[in-house]
Image (cartoon, rainbow, N blue to C red):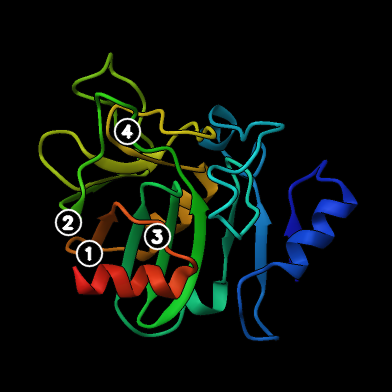
Amino acid sequence: MIRVAPGLPRTCALALFALSFAAPAHAQVEVLAPLPAESEVDARFPAPAAATPTTPEATTDRLRPGQFRWLPEAASAGGQVRIIVSLPLQRVYVFRGESLVGISTTSTGEPGYDTPTGTFRILQKKVHHRSNLYDDAPMPYMQRLTWDGIALHAGEVRDQPASHGCIRLPAAFARRLFAMTALGTEVSVIDAAPADPQEALTIASAG
């Protein structure tokens, strides 16, 4: 079953279906922006109504800023969770073992606040968190990667890097991701534009 964000034109919905990443025929694939009014967090960070994908020549998933895909069956399977962030594509890939669980748009650090590359481990998790550095800004579903302020969290996802170094995620995606990770889960931030999710996993594993 494919769910599409309300208001998405029928032609776009058909294109999303045709261009969905490879998945088993029985898998349920969600293609949606943060769920409207599902929670206070989701209402605070709605997806932009209209935007174009970042670097469209390299991005084949056709997701607009604020949208993501999620495979529930893969999420509940066995294997370790691994998260890969592509800075050039502004994409986050989530794997459990070798199976792709989800792809999300993201906004990472804007110029001057660049998100560092490398391999990190989740150090702290907090559903309701506020920034210690930037005006007590809300950081729902916070998953800390460094003690100097870099984290995964729900926030406004634009069509370009826009944060102070954190990895912003659509709220509904951040909530799902928060539920399946643990302290120590590996997060790789790469300065590469993989052609597909499996290449992202290969690049991160080689690094």
Tell me what residue is drawn at x 70 percent, y 86 percent. 25
Residue annotated with mark 3: 179
Q: Position of residue 30 (x, y in %)?
A: 66, 62
Which residue, given by chain and number where applicable, does mark 1 sit on? Answer: 186
Where is mark 4, residue-wise? 109
Sequence-first tag of 1 and 4: 4
How far apart, in angstroms, are the residues tagged by discs 2 and 3? 18 Å
Q: Residue at x 36, y 26 (%)?
A: 138
Q: Could you say which disc has been placed on residue 120 in the image?
A: 2
Of residues 108 and 79, the one nearer the viewer is 108
Whether residue 180 is situated above or below residue 165 in the rendered picture: below
**Circle 4: element type:** loop
Q: CA distance from mark 1 to mark 4?
A: 19 Å
192 lies left or right of 9:
left
Of mark 2 and mark 4, the one earlier in the sequence is 4
- The quarter in which the C terminus is drawn is bottom left
SS assignment at label 2: strand
Name the residue: 33% across, 83% down. Answer: 79
Tell me which amino acid carries mark 2.
Phe
